Amino acid sequence: MKKKLALLLSAIMLLAIVVIPAQAADTVYNLIDESGATWADTPANENTTTHSFTDGKLIVTAPGSWPYVVATLDEPLAFAESDNAKLNLKFTVEDAAAASSIRLMSGAEYIWVHQFITDAPILATSGDIEAGTFELSIDLFDLKMVEGVASTKDLVLVDGKLPIDGLQVWCAGDSTDIKVTVEKFEIVVPGGSTGEESKPATETKIVNLAKDKSYTKFGYYSDAEGNFPWPDVDDKELTNGAFATFADSSTYQDAAFVGFNIGAADMVAADNSRVSEIVVDLGKVEKLTKFRVETLSNGGVGIQAPLSITVSVSDDKTTWTEVGALAYGDVDVTTDVLFFASLEKAAQGRYVKFASDHDTNWVFISEVEVYGETTSTVTPPVTGEYGLVGFALVAAISLAGVVVISRKRA
Ligand SMILES: [Ca+2]
Ligand SMILES: [Ca+2]
C-alpha cells in the first residue's frame, strides 16, 4: 500500500510538473549599479558629496546641506503600466540631525520616492526624510510626481510609458556629518506565465478626457473693481461636467456660464485681441477624437456665438498644431440659442486650446470637452494562478485514474 501511495504521488508530481506552465524569470533593473550609470557629485552651499560603492551598496556622504549625487542611466528605462513593475528601495540616513531626499528622474519630472514610505518622518519645509532606516516596496504606477514640497501630481507618461532616466540622492539636514547608505534601489518586472492566457485583456473606450482637468484661460472678464460678473467658480466650471439649461432670453443668467469679454485686461493688453482662449491640460499626451463646446447666442444682451472656435493641440504648450474649427451645424446663431459646437477629427496632444473669435463683446461658455481613447485592463493577470489550477486539476485526475487501476487489480 505504501508503494502504491508513493507511485501515486510521483505520478501526480510528474504530471503536475509537465502541465504547470513555465514561468519566465523576473527582470531586475538595479538602479545603483555603479557601471550602469554616469555618477556625478553635485555641490550646494559650498558643500559637496562624495560617493562610493561597497558590497553593492551606494554610500553618499557630505559635510552639510544640499549637495547630491546624480546617476544618469546609460540606458534610460521606460515602463508601461501593464508591466506591473515594482520599485524596491532600502536606505539608511545618518546621523540624527541628517536628512535626505531620494529621487527618480523621469523626463523633465521627478518622483520623490522617499515620500511614499508609510509614516515616513518628512520635514514639512523641505519634503526631506529624517534620519532612520527605511524600506519601500511599491507598484511603480502607484508613485506620483512631485509638484511642490508637499504636493504631487499624476505620472507624466511619454508614449504611454513612464520613463526612468536616473536618480538622485540628496544630503540634507543640520548635520555636518551626513551619511546616506542606499542598500537597494531596483525596479522589478515580474516574469509571469509564458501562456497566452496570462496577457491582460484591455478595453479601449472613448470618453471625455477633459472632465475635471485643469485649464488656463485668456479673456476671462473682471470689472474695474476686480469682480467677475460671470464667474468661473474655483476655476473649475469649464470642465466640471455641468451644462447650462436653455430657458429663454435670460439663459445667459445660468450660473454654469463663464464670461469672456474683449474688455478683459489680458485681451486689451494683447493689442485689443478679439480672440479669447481656454487651454485644457489633459495631464499626458492622449489620442483624441472629438472636441465640443457649449456656448450661447443671446443677442439682446451682447452675447453672440463666436465667429469661430478653433481647436489646436500641443505636447508642450509651446508648439501648437491646429486641428480645425468647431461646426455649429444647423444652429441659427442669430436667434437666442444654447448649443454645442463640435468637431470630430483625430488628433494627439496633451494640451488642447479652444480659441473663440468674438463677434460681439461677450462669449459665454459653460463647458469644453475633449473626447479620446482610454484603455483599461478588464481582467488583470495573476501570475502563477494558472499553474496552481493546473496542478489541482492534474492531481484530481491522477488520483481518480489511480483509484480505478487499484480497483481493477483488487
Ligand atoms: Ca461646466
Ligand atoms: Ca459661472
Image: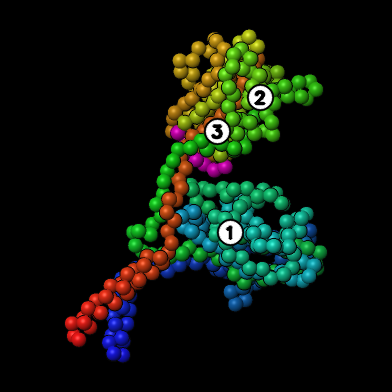
- Labels 2, 1: front one: 2
Quick check: 240 above or below 41?
above
- Labels 1, 3: front one: 3
Q: Residue at x 58, y 27 (%)?
A: 243
Identify the residue under disc 1.
Answer: 166
In the image, taking residue 185 as reference, residue 10 lies left or right, namely left
Q: Position of residue 25 (x, y in %)?
A: 42, 69
Quarter occupied by residue 302:
top right
- The answer to whether the beta carbon of the residue marked 2 is less than 8 Å from any atom of ligand 2 is yes
- How dense is the environment of label 2, judged by Cα within 10 Å: few (below 14), some, or many (20 and up)? some
Ligand 1 is found in the corner quadrant, namely top right
Q: Residue at x 44, y 28 (%)?
A: 344
Q: How is the image coloured?
A: rainbow
Q: Position of residue 113 (x, y in %)?
A: 63, 59
Quick check: 381 above or below 408?
above
What's the residue type where badge 1 is placed?
Gly
Identify the residue under disc 2.
Answer: 255
Circle nearer the N terminus (2, 3): 2
Task: Find numbered disc 3 in the image and state the secondary structure of the residue it sits on.
Answer: strand
Task: Find numbered disc 2 in the image and state the secondary structure of the residue it sits on.
Answer: loop
Q: Is residue 265 at least partly visible in the picture?
A: no
Q: Position of residue 108 (x, y in %)?
A: 60, 49
Circle nearer the N terminus (1, 3): 1
Identify the residue under disc 3.
Answer: 352
In the image, taking residue 196 as reference, residue 118 lies left or right, namely right
Q: Indicate whether residue 288 is drawn in magenta.
A: yes
Range drawn in magenta: 283-289
Q: CA distance from mark 2 to mark 3?
A: 24 Å
Task: Find numbered disc 1 in the image and state the secondary structure of the residue it sits on.
Answer: strand
